[in-house]
Image (tube, rainbow, N blue to C red):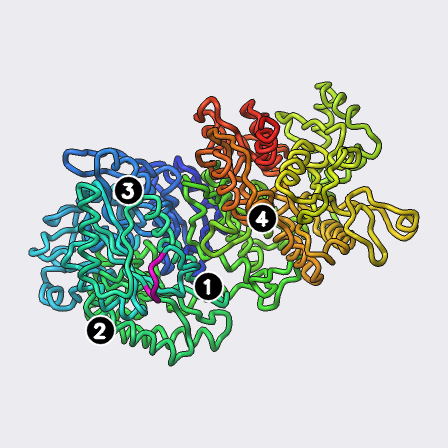
């Protein structure tokens, strides 16, 4: 057994990069995007090729396996291992050179594909292959798996676009593989020349043959290309340190033809016939994989066929020619780039959405990307569907129809013995079916552990034995990624689910989408790693903390991995008390971005609240949990005692404020927000209201922030809602013992004072975000009691603060899942813009006629939707788009000590730049109190709620 301390010391003495054999680093790399799990000894992040060589030398001396790892999005298990994982993304991630004249680029293996594309784009160039994970997959991983992507019909696989490589073998030899036997290790040429007949006849001829080693690339008629033969070797032959790549000329204009067919078989049969038109893509997907068919032509399946040209007219003409040649149910040609991106996002997210069946049950990879000759794809799909039915399984095929490559996730039962046995039987029979159609077990993602055991069915025993001899030439000690491709581990061993508890874990939230099972909720993360994208576009949010730190443990995937290991109990052994999980969750902003942006709907904010609830059960909490978690209580006391002015005065005395912040766990850099000297509901009680009472009744929710910190938002909302013809009331402030009426925050009678208890409604947000779930549940139940008269009517609840609206719509019914009133309340919640759109559809807002800047609240993006807000802004003449991302304050997060740097980095990503770059007359919209506070404290800018913007325009009119 390896002595970990001695190994760590030796690696630290030899390597200049980071060496981490701790629990967190190991837990983060137990899995990739496959069904498999292995616990490594540790992680090394080499700074350069010398570090790689040094780490290999240390491991070779001790017989420790080495696994090179990029983005960790491999789907067959090849990015997992039991030895040392080389993290090539932290330092070896640079674009070393780009030659526009030669059309080449030299990259390090950890460079993310999108970064190369961004650098090449100004020169009219791009790297041809583009997997759907292009925002986080690395060039080294693409070379290791011979990745392809949607444009392979035009530009081929990664192997087709590699010129030369720089590699280091397990024995430390530095080679530069390329054509003409360049960089071949001793013995490789003699081995190949002795097997030339087998190499000429034993390999299927199809565009997506990825399985096995590409030894046939070493034939003289294939230029004896050693670099090409290494593509798809999955890190089992050598460690890549540098690559020279060929770039292709990107078309100046593109048009997307969306072709609709009755079903996927019809689409599959048609795909091959479109290839003579030289399309850039021929991608297929069926209706059961599309969340909404809105914007797609009518049909049961679609081909996305992209055409290029030097001009928009030329591209459109090429797309229209494809439509005319296709026998379709319906068709659509899209030339608008934004609309094209929207449609492509549906296809790119399929790798995540396919992990759930339409009924919400789980589906898994393993047979993710078989490929057959394109002309046989229709027949293969029919046989594939039949095999699924024979085994009682379900799956939704999609993928690269033009190349005959199908992606599919299948609802295997990988939790029980009989289910795993069926998984094996199906895998064996499907392998035979693929081979019968002249196909390859892998058409894109490699063999790894998922398919390597079955390679003899495709190649025969003698060719597989040749693969083993090739491995022996490159890696005679078998140190590099053992168990992959040759001498493989069984396809049903090391399944990542086997370590999880079989009985449901006792939890506070209901997890309705996962049948109340916290383990199932954590299993949602399959490693697609969209959360690791280093930049976001449009309104996307996930994952701001990863973009701020660049650390895996601060990504949604990283946190899910740690929770998985916490439940497994093998590596993280102290369960809910785990400091590793706590520290990883500490920088989660609870922005809820993952709930919408993650293709599989991971909800890390809820998982964080759940963890904190258990972690601090019966123990003292951080001071910030008391200071900010109980904020509604402290603010209510200040209002009742009318001491807001005194509190503001004391907070303005710097020494006193410094002491208060230290005691409250608040970052010293933060200013304490001023309290309103007149809370919103007090203004409401003294105002003179119109006698008009025949409009639709709406109940305006006096959230903590509107009530005590920004009552101007509430006053503005009342002005606008009443101007739109609504009758506005506030919720009751008395909790009736029986009966009662809606109330308006001041209705009372002698009888009610005797039969009811005073209280105020609250969504429980601050308690939920700090994991004080028992208190949150009590607050929500009290609110439901108070609201019984409201719930007895059909009146909507207008909630101005997006985070509170989100808490009422999602958190409350999931937390108080045993009380049907919570779901009833959730169904009544509307945003300010929704209220105007639904209950005053004929009202015309005042004309603001100015540009707008700011940010869509992250909770609004994730849970509420901003369609009504966009339409309301447009009607008011507010032009421009709001930024995405997260402001970085995120309720209590940005105020907590130790979070200032991350909070500021999040704000600097999109919010603050968008405000700085806006026109001088732009209105700054920020509907969330946190967003407005962040703008004021970091940008010196006053943001306003949409209600305030409209109310001001009404006054001007």
**Gap between marks 1 and 3, in whole Å?**
37 Å
Q: Earlier in the sequence, mark 2 or mark 1?
A: 1
Q: Earlier in the sequence, mark 2 or mark 4?
A: 2
Which numbered marker is on residue 356?
1
Q: Residue at x 61, y 28 (%)?
A: 955
Q: Does dot 4 land on a helix, a strand or a loop?
A: helix
Query: Residue 366: x, y in percent?
Result: 37, 65
**What residue did someone put label 4 on?**
605
- Whether residue 457 is visible here, answered yes or no, is no
Q: Nearer the viewer's eye, disc 3 or disc 4?
A: 4
Q: Does dot 2 land on a helix, a strand or a loop?
A: loop
Check disc 4: other Cα within 10 Å, few if <14, some if 14-19, many if 20+: many
Q: Earlier in the sequence, mark 3 or mark 2?
A: 3
Q: Earlier in the sequence, mark 3 or mark 4?
A: 3
Q: Residue at x 74, y 24 (%)?
A: 648
| Total marks in image | 4
Q: Is residue 300 magenta?
A: yes
Labels 1 & 3 near each other (Cβ < 8 A): no
Q: Quadrant of residue 686?
A: top right
Q: Read off the magenta span.
A: 296-301
Vertical comparison of 838 with 404: above or below: above
Q: Does dot 3 land on a helix, a strand or a loop?
A: strand
Which numbered marker is on residue 437?
2
Which numbered marker is on residue 241?
3
Q: Residue furthest left?
A: 221
């Amino acid at each position: 057994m390896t002595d970990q301390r001695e190994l760590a010391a030796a690696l630290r003495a030899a390597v200049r990069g980071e060496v981490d054999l701790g629990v967190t680093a190991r837990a983060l790399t137990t899995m990739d995007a496959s069904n498999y799990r292995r616990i490594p000894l540790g992680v090394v992040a080499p700074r350069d090729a010398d570090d790689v060589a040094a780490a290999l030398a240390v491991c070779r001396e001790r017989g420790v396996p080495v696994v090179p790892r990029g983005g960790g999005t491999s789907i067959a298990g090849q990015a997992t291992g039991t030895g040392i994982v080389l993290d090539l993304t932290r330092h070896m991630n640079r674009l070393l050179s780009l030659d526009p004249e030669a059309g080449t680029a030299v990259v390090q293996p950890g460079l993310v594909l999108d970064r190369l594309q961004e650098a090449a784009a100004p020169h009219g160039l791009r790297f041809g292959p583009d997997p759907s994970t292009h925002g986080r997959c690395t060039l080294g991983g693409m070379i290791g798996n011979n990745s392809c992507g949607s444009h392979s019909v035009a530009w081929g696989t990664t192997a087709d676009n590699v010129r030369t490589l720089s590699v280091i073998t397990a024995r430390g030899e530095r080679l530069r593989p390329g054509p003409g036997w360049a960089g071949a290790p001793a013995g490789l040429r003699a081995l190949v020349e002795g097997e030339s007949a087998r190499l000429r006849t034993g390999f299927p001829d199809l565009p997506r043959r990825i399985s096995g080693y590409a030894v046939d690339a070493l034939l003289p008629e294939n230029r004896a290309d050693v670099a090409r033969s290494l593509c798809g070797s999955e890190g089992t032959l050598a460690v890549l340190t540098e690559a020279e790549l060929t770039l292709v000329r990107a078309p100046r204009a593109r048009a997307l033809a969306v072709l609709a067919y009755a079903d996927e078989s019809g689409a599959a049969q048609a795909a091959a016939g479109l290839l003579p038109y030289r399309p850039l893509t021929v991608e297929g997907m069926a209706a059961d994989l599309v969340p909404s068919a809105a914007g797609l032509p009518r049909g049961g399946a679609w081909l996305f066929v992209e055409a290029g040209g030097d001009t928009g007219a030329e591209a459109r003409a090429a797309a229209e020619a494809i439509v005319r040649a296709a026998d379709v149910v319906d068709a659509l040609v899209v030339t608008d780039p934004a609309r094209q991106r929207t449609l492509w996002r549906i296809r790119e997210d399929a790798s995540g959405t396919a992990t759930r069946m339409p009924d919400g049950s789980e589906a898994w990879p393993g047979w993710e990307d078989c490929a057959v000759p394109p002309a046989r794809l229709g027949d293969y799909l029919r046989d594939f569907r039949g095999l699924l039915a024979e085994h009682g399984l379900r799956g939704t095929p999609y993928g690269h129809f033009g190349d005959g490559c199908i992606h599919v996730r299948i609802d295997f039962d990988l939790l029980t013995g009989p289910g795993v046995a069926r998984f094996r039987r199906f895998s064996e029979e499907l392998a035979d079916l693929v081979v019968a159609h002249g196909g390859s077990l892998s058409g894109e993602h490699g063999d790894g552990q998922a398919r390597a055991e079955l390679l003899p069915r495709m190649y025969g025993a003698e060719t597989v034995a040749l693969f083993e001899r090739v491995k022996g030439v490159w890696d005679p000690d078998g140190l590099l990624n053992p168990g992959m491709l040759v001498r493989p581990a069984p396809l049903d061993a090391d399944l990542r689910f086997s370590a999880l508890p079989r009985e449901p874990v006792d939890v506070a939230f209901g997890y309705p989408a996962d049948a109340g099972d916290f383990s199932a909720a954590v299993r949602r993360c399959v490693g697609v790693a969209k959360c690791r994208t280093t930049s976001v576009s449009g309104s996307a949010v996930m994952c701001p903390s990863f973009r701020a730190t660049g650390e895996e443990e601060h990504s949604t995937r990283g946190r899910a991995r740690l929770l998985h290991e916490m439940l497994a109990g093998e590596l993280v052994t102290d369960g809910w008390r785990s400091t590793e999980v706590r520290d990883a969750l500490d920088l989660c902003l609870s922005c809820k971005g993952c709930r919408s942006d993650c293709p599989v709907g991971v909800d890390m904010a809820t998982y964080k609240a759940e963890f904190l609830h258990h972690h601090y059960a019966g123990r003292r909490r951080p001071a910030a949990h008391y200071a900010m978690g109980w904020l509604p209580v402290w603010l209510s006391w200040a209002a009742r005692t009318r001491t807001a002015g005194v509190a503001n005065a004391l907070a303005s005395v710097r020494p006193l404020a410094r002491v208060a912040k230290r005691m409250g766990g608040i970052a010293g850099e933060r200013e304490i927000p001023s309290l309103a000297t007149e809370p919103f509901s007090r203004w409401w009680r003294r105002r003179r209201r119109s006698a008009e009472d025949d409009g639709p009744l709406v109940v305006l929710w006096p959230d903590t922030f509107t009530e005590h910190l920004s009552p101007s938002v509430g006053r503005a909302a009342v002005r606008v809602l009443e101007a739109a013809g609504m009758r506005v009331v506030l919720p009751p402030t008395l909790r009736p013992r029986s009966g009662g009426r809606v109330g308006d925050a001041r209705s009372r009678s002698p009888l009610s004072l005797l039969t009811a208890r005073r209280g105020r409604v609250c969504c429980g947000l601050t308690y939920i975000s700090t994991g004080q779930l028992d208190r949150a549940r009590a607050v929500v139940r009290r609110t439901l009691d108070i609201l019984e008269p409201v719930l007895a009517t059909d009146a909507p609840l207008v909630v101005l603060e997006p985070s509170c609206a989100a808490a009422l719509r999602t958190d409350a019914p999931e937390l108080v899942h045993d009380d049907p009133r919570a779901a009833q309340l959730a169904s009544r919640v509307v945003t300010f813009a929704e209220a105007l759109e639904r209950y005053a559809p004929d009202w015309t807002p005042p004309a603001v006629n100015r540009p707008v800047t700011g940010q869509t609240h992250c909770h609004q993006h994730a849970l509420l939707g901003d369609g009504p807000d966009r339409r309301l802004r447009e009607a008011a003449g507010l032009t421009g788009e709001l930024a995405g991302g997260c402001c970085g304050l995120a309720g209590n997060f940005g105020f907590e000590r130790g979070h200032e740097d991350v909070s500021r980095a999040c704000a600097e990503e999109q919010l603050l730049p968008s405000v700085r770059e806006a026109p001088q007359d732009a209105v700054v919209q920020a509907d969330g109190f946190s967003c407005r506070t962040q703008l004021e404290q970091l940008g010196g800018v006053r943001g306003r709620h949409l209600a305030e913007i409209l109310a001001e325009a009404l006054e001007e009119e």
